[in-house]
Image (cartoon, grey):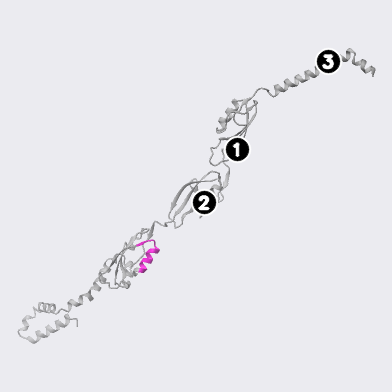
Amino acid sequence: MSKVVQYLQTPTFRKNIIAALIAIVCLFLSVYVGLKIYTKHDESIAVPKVKGLHISAAIQALENAGLEYQIDSVYQMDAKPGMVIEQDPEQGFHVKSGRTIYLTIITQVAPEVAFPNIKDKTLIEATAILKNHNLRIGDTSYVADIARDIVLDAQFAGQSIRNGRMIPKGSRIDLVLGNGLGANEVEIPNLVGLPLNEAKFALSGAGLGLGTVTYDPNVTDTATAVISVQSPGIEKGLTSLGAKIDVTLSLTAPAPTTGAPAGGGNIAPKPQTNQTQANPPAAKPPVQSKPVAPAKSTTTNTPAAKPTTTNPAAGQKKEKENKSNSLGF
């Protein structure tokens, strides 16, 4: 024990202690200065704002500030491609030079998605399906079809698109919808020879309406009357949807009217012949007026006046025959 105490009192020990302390202090100072230099103590750079900038402008701003960057990309349907939507650290945060700034941008090349089946869907259903697939509705056009607001066709880049085709997200899809009105023009039905109630049914089925109804003067019972004339006629071929068809009803039997379409150009003359056939029964009462018949007989018998002087009985016989012929016997 005494030898240890004696050694601690020697100059050699004191020199060793002093040397060790100096070495420790030097080591501490070197570590402190080295860390200060390595960590760039008391040196900081404010992170510039790059959120909302295009990626090219954001990279230029970070490089000018002496900062590094790392880029990640996502897809957003309504955002501009290449725009920075997030940065970490945020604007104004103090960092060391060379610090990595993490950027999130909108991808410049949209990912692809399979086109869904939207045909024969309503417009509301098609809109929801396209939105779920990150697709947008472009132009909508309507065509003649009985189905209203039903998707009849879907087009991409001006061409019809089939189900399952891969297209970029955010693409615009043009829709062709039905207007609920059907065809703009329909064929004119043949109403000649039909009763009025059947004609109304035929017009309703064709998408047409009944216009002006006129009756022939000889019609006394409308239930037995049939259509003899329609305007426009079947020779016109087509007419606008919802147009009115004017008809004329008469007592004419439907048999002559069935031959009218086959005759083509004889359609106009035949109603006149029917009217002449219907007129003789109405003309019978004035024929019975006897004063008219003697007037005809006297005029016709003027050349036979010469033999009346020689044979009165023969003249009277001829007058009786003329009267009987005028009465239809």
- Residue 143's disc is none
Q: Residues within 10 Å of mark 3 (few under 14, many from 20)?
A: few
Q: Outermost residue toward the left?
A: 309
Q: Is residue 37 above or below residue 271?
A: above
Amino acid under label 3?
Answer: Ile
Closer to the camera, 276 or 4?
4
Please give the residue where the numbered disc 3 appears in the rendered image: 18
Q: Which residues are magenta?
A: 197-209
Find residue 309 and report its horizontal and vertical position in percent.
4, 84
Q: Label 3 vs label 1: CA separation? A: 61 Å
Tell me, yes or no, whether the two marked residues, 2 and 3, touch with CB atoms within 8 Å: no
Reading the chain from its start, which is encountered first: label 1 or label 2?
1
- Which residue is at a point 44% across and 50% down the rendered structure image? 141
For discs 2 and 3, the disc positioned in front in the rendered view? 3
Magenta-drawn stretch contains 172: no
Quadrant housing the N terminus: top right
Amino acid under label 2?
Answer: Ala
Please give the residue where the numbered disc 2 appears in the rendered image: 126
Q: Residues within 10 Å of mark 2 (few under 14, many from 20)?
A: many
- Which residue is at a point 75% across and 19% down the rendered structure image? 30
Q: Secondary structure at mark 1?
A: strand
Q: Outermost residue toward the bottom?
A: 313
Q: Is residue 25 above or below residue 205?
A: above
Tell me, yes or no, whether the two marked residues, 1 and 2, touch with CB atoms within 8 Å: no
